[in-house]
Amino acid sequence: MRIGDVTVQPLLDGVLPMPPSVLYPDVSMSTWRSLPGTIGEDGLLPVPFGGFLATDEQGNRVVFDLGGGVAPQLVPGGDPPAVRELLPIQLEKLGCPLDSVTDVVLSHLHIDHVGWASTDGRPVFPGARHHIHAEDWKHFVDERADEAVRSKVSPLGDTAALWDGDSVSLFGWLRLVHAPGHTPGSSVAVIESQGQSLALVGDLFHHPAALDHPDWRCGFDWDAELGAATRAHWAHQLRAAHTPLVGPHFPDLTAVTLR
Ligand SMILES: [Zn+2]
């Protein structure tokens, strides 16, 4: 994907087929069956997880979300992923050594987004600033909402760059906007360059089928009511602006435009 002067490439970490009710507990199987190209014959939804690499002409290399990491257990009590691509290998293939990454943006601190934050207690991207909303750091690290997440992100140490409030601009082309509900510090990354734009929405939407249904409750939402309100707001905004969007669980990590 080319957004003005910025190139965005998908980084697949793996694919985990799961019952769609894990993501959307209130949506029936008959609804999924009526949506072509979603669930397979086995009734499972193949859910990718991964991230994106954005590069600009100034040499900045920004990775958005970090997949599930080594041997992840992404669904409590669940199977390991059926497909593993491994995000660091994808980066190397794109000619981007791990120590050349300048920035990591974490949309939120769920385990399937912080898997490659650290291994063996050391940051995987030692030269990168890791941008995390302070509300998520407080919830997951200080208040210990999830010990697996805490042990993944605690080793970030001084490389963790916490931001607060409604939004922050990291570069002329990159703005992070607080979008709470899925977690307290969830955020959307908006890329804008030369009149073109793209929104990296994290887990605001897990599947494009949900774009027309912001009221679909996600099984992993921290605050379901706030989550629904935030989704409705963003769906409206992105539709009005004709801004394409993509998240790290979208099929083939491919962007869609709301009509
Ligand atoms: Zn997720």
Image: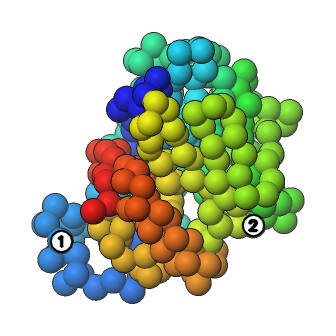
- The tag on residue 25 is none
Q: Earlier in the sequence, mark 2 or mark 1?
A: 1
Name the side, left or right, on which 46 lies relative to 2: left
Identity of the residue drawn at 18% across and 71% down: 35
State the image coordinates of residue 102 (x, y, percent, origin top left): 66, 23
Q: Residue at x 72, y 21 (%)?
A: 127
Q: Nearer the viewer, residue 57 or 13?
A: 57
Which residue is farthest front?
195
- Residue where numbered disc 2 is placed: 145
Vertical order, 100 against 138 (above or below): above
- Rendering quarter of residue 157: top right
Q: Amino acid at mark 2?
A: Ala
Which residue occupies 66% across, 31% down? 171
Q: Quadrant of residue 25?
A: bottom left
Q: Is disc 2's CB within 8 Å of ligand 1?
A: no
Q: Quadrant of the N terminus?
A: top left
Which x, y percent locates residue 97? Answer: 55, 15
Callout in the foreground (2, 1) = 1
Asked if residue 85 is positioned above or below residue 139 in the image, the reply reads above
Residue placed at 70% from the left, 26% from the top? Answer: 128
Mark 1 close to ligand 1, CB under 8 Å: no
The residue that mark 1 highlights is 35
Residue 185 in view of the camera? yes
Residue 213 at x, y = what percent?
36, 77
Question: Rounded to the nearest whole Å, what is the CA distance between mark 2 and mark 1?
Answer: 35 Å
Is the C terminus in the top left, top right, bottom left or bottom right quadrant? bottom left
Q: Residues within 10 Å of mark 1 (few under 14, many from 20)?
A: few
Q: Is residue 167 left or right of residue 189?
A: right
Secondary structure type for disc 1: loop
Residue placed most toward the observer, 80 or 216:
216
Determine contact: label 2, label 1, CB under 8 Å.
Answer: no
Q: What percent of the width, then of the height, locates residue 242?
A: 36, 54
